[in-house]
């Protein structure tokens, strides 16, 4: 970079970390290129509500260009980064374009970890993108339609089984929301089966769900899930997954609705960096979030491995990514702070964690203050509305939640024909629906 040229900052990823970094640089004298393989920022914490027909995709996704339409120092680029070439200071896109940088912020997130069992992915999709959520929604709705048309109780049963694997916050939220559908609010629309014939399983290999939370909150969460009718199986490792079948030690559950929410692994871009990684493939960054051997390259959010004050890895959650984005922007805004020799380390401020369970319950741990039930849910709702980007989205989500709260109805129960989606390949696919029913 010549002395009077503006610094070229390239950000990979328009998720929580990337968007925060770019926004915090609004007044900085830098040129920003924000590259994302999708054209939208996705509010992943509410994806499960799209998967369970409570919200529409447009409620939780915003075009990245719209976010920066008034920020003149940001250029938004649709493209998939496949490699970072540290020595040349360029990133390479899938179509071989090379984008040069002075400073690079890698905020490319993570993907689901199938722990080496790659074949399981097509039978048990994870929930990470809008396409995943719509496929899961379609499977759930198709199952209920199918069950409504099968006379034999034995043949019908598999369509009334729903399995969520992984007892972290995403799995807990997903299982609670499915139980709302399968045990309560949509049941009056079907005549051929009753709620007590539906089974929702939450399967966790470890000794308890919500492992990162205080033990009392894990127990409360189990109680709330059970009240909703979820069968919580802890200490239950999955041994195999085949089409419409999940194998546990000593038992098999048949279901076309198997959802994976068990652990994440870093994005493949991290493998192309000159850096050590942890077991989940995340970059082990220096205390200032940069690569120890390349101080102009920062990795933030789900892609980074950073320890807290007690020596535990920071969790893969949105506040971590956002605080790290804000921190990196603070360095870039002030040349005296940017110098690698004097950079202050990043410090995470833990404001607490929460998970919602069903229609109006949640568990929350706010700096040691533990709450559960309706009050925790109210807090969860306010916080999630506040963090959604865009006034229209906030208003719409608020209205949908109120509608759902008072009527118990889910508004987005559409089964759409979306050719090209590859996740679902079971009998429930749109084009095969009706076969053998
Ligand atoms: C279902 C679900 C529920 C969750 N619930 C919560 C919750 O309740 N609370 C909470 O705090 N956290 C929650 N999280 C975690 C939270 O969403 C993540 O920690 C957060 O999104 C991480 O931010 P990030 O910027 O690191 O990555 P992301 O937000 O994942 O953004 C990564 C971006 O990079 C882009 N990208 C990826 N690869 C490439 C590439 N090769 N080239 C170009 N662009 C690329 C992606 O398209 C994406 O836009 C949840 C996650 C999921 C999946």
Image: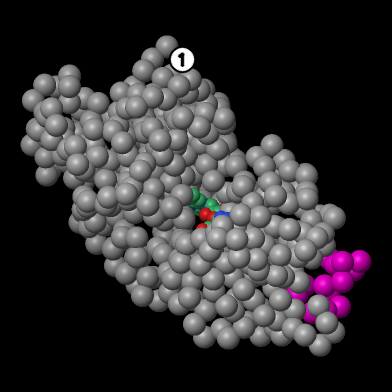
Tell me if 309 is positioned left or right of 252 in this view.
Answer: right
Residue for point 78% across, 44% down:
276
Q: Position of residue 25 (x, y in %)?
A: 66, 78
Q: Position of residue 398 (x, y in %)?
A: 34, 67
Residue lying at the far front of the rendered structure? 96
Q: Is residue 343 magenta?
A: yes
Tell me if 268 is positioned left or right of 284 in this view.
Answer: left
Residue for point 77% across, 63% down:
88
Residue 69 drawn above or below residue 403: below
Q: Position of residue 119 (x, y in %)?
A: 46, 30
Residue 174 drawn above or below residue 240: below
Along the line of sight, the residue nearer the viewer: 404 or 393: 393
Residue for point 57% across, 31% down:
115
Main SS of the magenta part reads loop
Along the line of sight, the residue nearer the viewer: 79 or 366: 79
The residue segment tinted magenta is: 331-350
Residue 53 drawn above or below residue 335: above
Q: Position of residue 261 (x, y in %)?
A: 47, 39
Circle 1 sits in a helix, a strand or a loop, which is it? Answer: loop
Residue lying at the far top of the rendered structure? 250
* Residue tagged 1: 249
Along the line of sight, the residue nearer the viewer: 238 or 65: 65
Tell me if 4 is positioned left or right of 180 in this view.
Answer: right
């Amino acid at each position: 970079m010549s002395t009077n040229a503006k610094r070229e900052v390239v950000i990979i990823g328009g998720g929580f970390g990337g968007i925060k970094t770019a926004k915090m640089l609004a007044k900085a004298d830098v040129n920003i290129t924000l590259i994302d393989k999708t054209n939208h920022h996705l509010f992943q914490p509410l994806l499960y509500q799209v998967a369970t027909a409570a919200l529409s995709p447009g409620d939780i996704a915003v075009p990245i260009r719209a976010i920066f339409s008034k920020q003149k120092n940001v250029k938004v680029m649709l493209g998939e980064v496949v490699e970072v070439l540290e020595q040349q200071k360029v990133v390479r896109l899938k179509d071989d374009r090379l984008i040069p940088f002075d400073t690079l912020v890698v905020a490319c997130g993570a993907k689901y970890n199938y722990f080496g069992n790659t074949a399981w992915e097509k039978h048990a999709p994870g929930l990470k993108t809008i396409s995943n959520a719509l496929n899961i929604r379609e499977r759930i709705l198709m199952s209920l339609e199918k069950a409504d048309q099968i006379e034999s109780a034995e043949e019908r049963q598999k369509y009334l089984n729903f399995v969520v694997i992984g007892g972290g916050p995403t799995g807990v939220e997903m299982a609670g929301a499915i139980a709302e559908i399968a045990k309560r609010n949509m049941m009056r629309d079907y005549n051929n089966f009753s709620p007590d014939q539906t089974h929702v399983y939450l399967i966790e290999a470890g000794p308890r769900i919500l492992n990162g939370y205080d033990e009392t909150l894990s127990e409360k969460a189990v109680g709330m899930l059970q009240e909703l009718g979820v069968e919580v199986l802890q200490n239950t490792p999955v041994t195999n997954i085949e089409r419409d079948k999940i194998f546990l030690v000593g038992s098999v559950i048949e279901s076309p609705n198997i959802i994976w929410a068990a652990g994440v692994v870093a994005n493949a871009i991290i493998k192309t960096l000159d850096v050590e990684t942890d077991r989940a493939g995340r970059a082990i960054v220096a205390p200032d979030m940069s690569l120890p051997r390349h101080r102009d390259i920062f990795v933030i959010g789900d892609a980074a491995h950073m320890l807290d004050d007690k020596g535990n890895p920071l969790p893969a959650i949105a506040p971590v990514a956002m605080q790290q984005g804000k921190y990196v922007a603070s360095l870039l805004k002030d040349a005296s702070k940017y110098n690698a020799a004097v950079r202050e380390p990043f410090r995470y401020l833990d404001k607490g964690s929460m998970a919602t369970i069903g229609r109006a319950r949640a568990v929350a741990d706010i700096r040691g203050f533990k709450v559960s039930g309706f009050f925790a849910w109210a807090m969860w709702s306010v916080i999630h509305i506040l963090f959604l980007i865009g006034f229209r989205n906030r208003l719409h989500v608020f209205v949908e939640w109120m509608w759902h709260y008072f009527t118990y109805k889910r508004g987005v129960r559409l089964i759409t024909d979306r050719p090209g989606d590859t996740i679902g390949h079971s009998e429930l696919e749109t084009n095969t629906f009706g076969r053998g029913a």
